Each structure stands twice: as C-alpha cells, then as structure tokens.
Amino acid sequence: MTPDNTGQKQGAPPFKPGQSGNPAGRPKGSRNKLGEAFLTALSSDFDTHGVLAIQAAREEDPVAYVKVVASLLPKELKIERSAVEEMSDDELARLIDVVRAEIGPAGEAGEGEGSAGG
C-alpha cells in the first residue's frame, strides 16, 4: 500500500503535552557519560604520554603541530601599553645602549647573564 500524496502529514496523531515521544528512550543523565568517560581516559593517557606525543607531533608533522598550537590561542589578542611607550627619548637611547652592549658586535651575548660562560 502506498501513502496518499495529499500534502498532509501521515501517521500517528501528535503527542499530548508532557508526554514523551519515546518513553523507553535514553535515560536522564546518560547523554554526557560517554563524553565524561572519554575525557577521563584522554586525561589519563595524556598524563602518561602527553610530553612524548607533543614532541613526536612537533618533529614528525610541524605544520599540524603549529595548527594545533594556533587553535589553542585566543582569537583576539589584547595588546596593552608597555613601559617603552612611556619612556622619554633619552631613556630609550640608554636602554638601546645597554642592549647593544649586552649583545656585542657579533650579535652574541656579552659577559652578562645572557652568556653561556657567565
């Protein structure tokens, strides 16, 4: 038997208010159980293998690694004023001199904290 093509809905009448369309359906609270179990297992696995997995991703597929890192960053980056903006020209010149002295002529760290031998 074929359904009538009258343009009207076929089938059972609508449910009464408060009556479930699937009384034997999914129990309350079960919707998130799978997600919670998955996140618990994932967290446990990451505790054990996370550092090595990150290292392997970085070495074997750096493009995917950077995509993951970028996806974790906030979409907007709020830039606040820095102390450099409020320095006078003389203060900036002194700061540049200090940095140049630390870097040295070849772009290597000088005798200060930035050097490997210091």
Image (cartoon, rainbow, N blue to C red):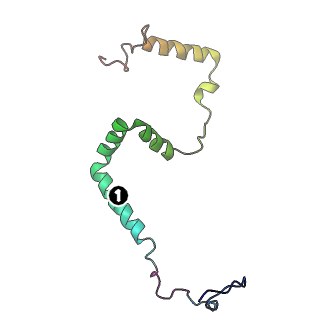
Which image quadrant is residue 89 in?
top right
Q: Which residues are drawn in magenta?
A: 21-28
Query: Residue 90: horizontal and vertical position, in percent?
Result: 61, 14
Is 29 or 101 nearer to us in this picture?
29
Picture quarter with the N terminus? bottom right
Which image quadrant is residue 29 in?
bottom left
User: Residue at the location (59% across, 25% down)?
Assistant: 84
Picture quarter with the C terminus? top left
Above or below: residue 64 compared with residue 82: below
Which image quadrant is residue 86 in?
top right
Query: Residue 113: horizontal and vertical position, in percent?
Result: 37, 20
User: Residue at the location (48% across, 12% down)?
Assistant: 100
Above or below: residue 29 compared with residue 116: below
Query: Residue 49: horizontal and vertical position, in percent?
Result: 28, 49
Query: Residue 32: horizontal and vertical position, in percent?
Result: 44, 70
Is 16 or 108 nearer to us in this picture?
16
User: For this view, does 17 lie left or right of residue 25?
Assistant: right
Q: Which residue in the rendered view is the most extreme toward the top?
A: 105
Report the residue marked by disc 1.
42
